[in-house]
Image (tube, rainbow, N blue to C red):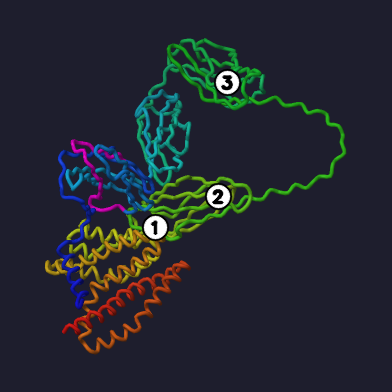
Amino acid sequence: MKGVLPVCLILFWILTLIVPPSSAILVTDCTLAYADGALTIKAEPSMNETYPGGYCTYLIDLDGSYTGNASLLYEWVIFTPPGVELSITPNEGTVPFTAKLRINTSSYTPPGNYTLRIVARGEGGAPKAETEILLVVKIPDFSISVTPSSNYVQKGESITFSVIVQATKGFYSTVTLNVSGLPRGTSFTFSVESKVPPFTSTLAIMTSETTPEGTYRITVMGSGGGRTHNVTIELEVIEAVGFKISVTPTYGKVIHGEAVSFQVNVSALGEFTSPVSLMVGGLPSGCSIISSINNVPPDFSAALTIRTSNTTPIGNYSLHVVGIGGGITKYSNSFMMEVVEPPTPSPTPSPTPSPTPTPTPSPEKFDFSLTTTPSEITVKPESSFSITVEVKLLSGSPEPVSLDVKGLPMDSTFSFSSLTVVPNGTVIIYIMTGKTTGGFTLLISGTSNGITKTARVVLRIEKEKRCIIATVAYGSELSPYVQRLRSFRDEVIMSSFAGREFMKVFNAFYYPWSTPLAKIISRHDILRTVVRISIYPLIAVLDISREAYELLCPINAELGVIFTGAFAGSLLGLLYLIPIICLALSIKRVKEVLSFMRGKAHIPLIAGLLMLSLGEVFNSSISVAIGGPLFLLSVMISTAIVLGFAVSKRILANN
């Protein structure tokens, strides 16, 4: 058994050099026998869309002349998108069969197009078939379309367009419509001015006699959730012909069962001389009209009387006068008629002694609190993240609270899962950053019944920290080895509070010297080869550590990262530091120093773990930032020193 540990270390290094870590999924076949027949695989749909925090599904059909058992595997092409989870049900069966693939994204999955390769294998590894599907992750958004895209209207007349607002998955904000580019003397109205899509609104554009003739490019705008979209339409204003109608006043109130009067003015345009008959559009049931003048050529003014009945419903009605004459139909301006109930006669009250009034307690005033999670966020440019806003009722009856966010960079966009929330409730804010970097303080406010509550979130947009030395060694950021290093950093280390604080310390240490060193490495092929060889064991350690993390993460993400760090630190100390320690032990003075360190190795180890634990309990960034690196370095050095002495002792014993 002597010398077993050194031999194992040497074999491990040789294996990592001969068989570099693969970015593909490993497949273990139970038999080497190959089955006859062909296997086909098809995915429906081949492309699907979702949003950060959403999901989508695909159907995977396996068919062909092969009739044995087949299993389904998958691998991401290029790299794995952060925060994505997949499941295939069933993942094996007797051909033919259909499986369901579900892909779940998280709030921090960046927008983009991701290709997934699905591989079907028969028993013994053959036959084999594969297909690729596309996952498109988009920030929740909306779109606007207008029909028709062009039209014409006579001066003084109105024209309508249909505005259709559609939403992509995950967009729940209110979209407000507006119009710009209208000619002089023109106004507009929307039947629905603002609403959460999908919805359709009728845009009415009203011209006047002063509107200049010509063709105009009019912009219909929609704004909501921090996003704005425009559609341009063309409107041609032509010379007016026929006649025009106007109604005054624009509002009249009538008691249920009685009548109300309006004045209708009809004027000829140009040489129009045909008789014009009048009717009213929009009348409620149970109404009749009487016009003092009707079916005569313009110009004329008529008294229009609208009589209600006992069956006319109570309410407000938007009406317009329709004029027909000479084959032309014209509409007046809109006017409002309000039908009200007749007053109820009050009975003569009998004098009664006044009771002693009982004081009525005043209702408790409405109040609420607003908190956000997290309070600090660090992201990369052109990435997405979410903030959870929690609104709690403090007193009174619940009332809707309107939310808003300010302080984002100009090129960042946002959307709410809901623009209002009734306490107690939560709302998620989805934010997509642009290219702007720096520190920002987001002010998230909630307003209701004259009360405004705010919460602040510190946002840091920092350029992505790159694996500079590994990128130079492997020649590209798209190298699967570089992607695996970045994936471990982003998906494992950065998934916890302890990991994020550790990376701040690591980045402050690593980047000042890594850039000039990378420039030196890039100029020498031999150095690049040496660095690649030295990184292979690191990648192997991180792969093994990721497996440990995935076992512990479901229990507790923070503990998972801490124990994964200790596990990885032990392996790194074993692989990288033990050879150095063994050589150093041949020097007497160094051996004395290392012997002293071995006796005291537990002190920094316990101190680091204690500071790390206190930082986790009290959410102290400083304590975690000091304790995390101290604990990891102590694990690496302690492992290397203790095992280094053991290896050195075995070597001396053999000699």
Q: Position of residue 616 (x, y in %)?
A: 44, 67
Q: Give the residue displayed 65% in from the left and 50% down from the top.
A: 365
Evaluate whether residue 396 shows in this view: yes
The C terminus - image quarter: bottom left
Tell whether position 548 is magenta. Answer: no
Q: Magenta segment range?
A: 58-81
Marks 1 and 2 sit apart, C-alpha to C-alpha, by 28 Å
Q: Position of residue 383 (x, y in %)?
A: 34, 53
- Name the mark on residue 245: none
Marks 2 and 3 sit apart, C-alpha to C-alpha, by 42 Å
- Name the mark on residue 424: 2
As drawn, 347 above or below 276: below
Q: Are marks 2 and 3 in contact (CB under 8 Å)?
A: no
Quadrant location of residue 629? bottom left
Evaluate whether residue 48 shows in this view: no
User: Which label's residue is closer to the chain start, 2 or 3?
Assistant: 3
Tell whether position 59 is magenta. Answer: yes
User: Which label's residue is closer to the chain start, 1 or 3?
Assistant: 3
Q: Position of residue 642 (x, y in %)?
A: 29, 79
Q: Give the residue displayed 22% in from the left and 54% down from the top.
A: 26
